[in-house]
Amino acid sequence: MADFAAAAVPWVATALVLAGFLLAYRRATGSWRLWRLAVGRDGRYSTSLFQGLAWTVVVLASYLAIWFARLHLGATGAIGPVPQSVLAAMGLSLGTTATAAGITSRRVRSRSEQRDPADADDLALRQLVCDDSGRPNLAKAQLMAWTVVALGIYAVTAVATVVRTAGAASLDGLPPLPDIEPTLLILMGIGQGAYLAVKAASAPEVAIGADATGGPTAASPLATALAAVEPVVSDGHPLLAAAAKPGSAAVPGFLPSRNGLHFINAWPHEPDVTIKLPGGGTLPIGDASNGVCGGMVYTVRDVFQTPGLAPVARTDNPLPGSALYRYIVKRLLESFDVGHLGVGRYLEWMLTPDGDAALGPALVRRGVAWKTVVEEWAGRIRPEIDAGRLVCLGLITVAGADPRQLGENHQVMAYGYDVGADGTLTVHVYDPNTPPAQADTVTISLSVLHPERATPITHNVAISHPIRGFFHTSYTYQDPRSQLD
């Protein structure tokens, strides 16, 4: 009985932490329905989103339970290293999700066809193994089967690891985070490959709608990644000419030194959010010292777009708990677009090569350069600035599958651009890391002539990493007047 209790305690602690995450999700999205993360924008369950969500939950719960079992023995450090096979499994899941979205979005050639969204009452688990017409789909069924088998085996292994850890007599020789058998990983990859191959061969044309800012939206939560796979031939792409067309534009009236925040993104070690727990305790989430760039960018845009509201005047960072601090943190959480797996978009770009990669004689996987220049700059960012609207940008600064590097990426806001006759694009941005005295001179520059190649980006944004690419984030206006100091 004692051994059972010792093994049960880590799972109880894990359940409490996951409940805290669920509370944070509820606060960010207004809904308790976590499973809605597996629903595409067409209102149906997405097979690729489901397997990505399932792997995230299982690996997170396993890591926490093993860590709590170690904590009971006095080990306070992180579990490491994370097995490469686990990172590969999560990377495969994310890659499948993003590639599936890219295949669909690459079918867009006109606005004459639009996939009708399903009614909320039509949401059913059968959609995980059926096509949109309700017919069973072998590729989906195979992907789901191997996902369930792999997750089941991993969960059993994690439980056994917790039991062994809880029963250990010392810190020596503690078992690591469970690995995944290479054979099982290969079978998962085959299932995901078959699913993508069938989708690539049969995906219908759908039209892209418009989001709250007037830019295009994609057909699933990660479809904003766009264009993971498409035919090799790309000469004459309609957006190539738009990307390189010489010209200049700026949002009227916006200047970072005047309209930006007059303090920089430097904060003490304080929780981003503190959740009150039943019984009087609290659960701290996040660390402001890691930066709140997205919240600062969204706050500046909210203030600028509010008629008659003057820029925030204070020059010192607001104290934790103040109205302005709470508002910035709230907008930070919303900048991650949790309800639509916005963080997954950063991971997908981190996993994308710098230049195009051939997948055979007929297909190519678009690289970060193409996605930045053609899909984001020409397709979304330039039209917004031309229309006089600010554009919030996510900057990708690292490459790889390690989710711990997500915080190395950054958020800024574009307010103007210049495209020279030589094809050099210079984007003028508000950077929350740059002091106000230098704020008006921050730029990001690159050539837009050969987006199929890895394209160097030069910048003076106040970050330590190079910029690999950037994309338009999902901003929705909020009126800040009743919530600021």
Image (spheres, grey):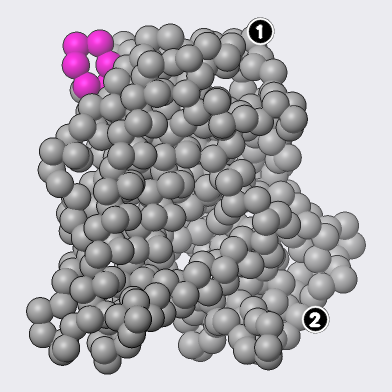
Give SS at disc 1.
loop
Residue 319 versus residue 238 in the image, above or below: below
Name the mark nearer the viewer: 2 or 1: 1
39 left or right of 363 in image: right
Task: Identify the amino acid type marked 1.
Answer: Ser
Is residue 64 at least partly visible in the picture?
Answer: yes
Which of marks 1 and 2 precedes in the sequence?
A: 1
Please give the name of the residue rendered at 80% of the width and 81% of the height, measured from the top-left corner: 485
The numbered mark at residue 485 is 2
Residue 66 position, x and y percent, is 30, 72
Give SS at disc 2.
loop
256 or 322: nearer the eye? 322
Please give the name of the residue rendered at 17% of the width and 35% of the height, measured from the top-left corner: 186
Identify the magenta region.
359-366
Q: In the picture, which quadrant includes the N terminus?
A: bottom left
Please give the name of the residue rendered at 69% of the width and 36% of the height, measured from the top-left corner: 211
Label 1: how many residues lie within 10 Å, few (<14), some (14-19) or many (20+)?
Answer: few
Residue 186 versus residue 406 in the image, above or below: above
Please give the name of the residue rendered at 18% of the width and 83% of the height, measured from the top-left corner: 168
The residue indicated by pointer 1 is 112
240 left or right of 108 in image: left
Residue 354 position, x and y percent, is 27, 40
Task: Identify the amino acid type marked 2.
Answer: Asp
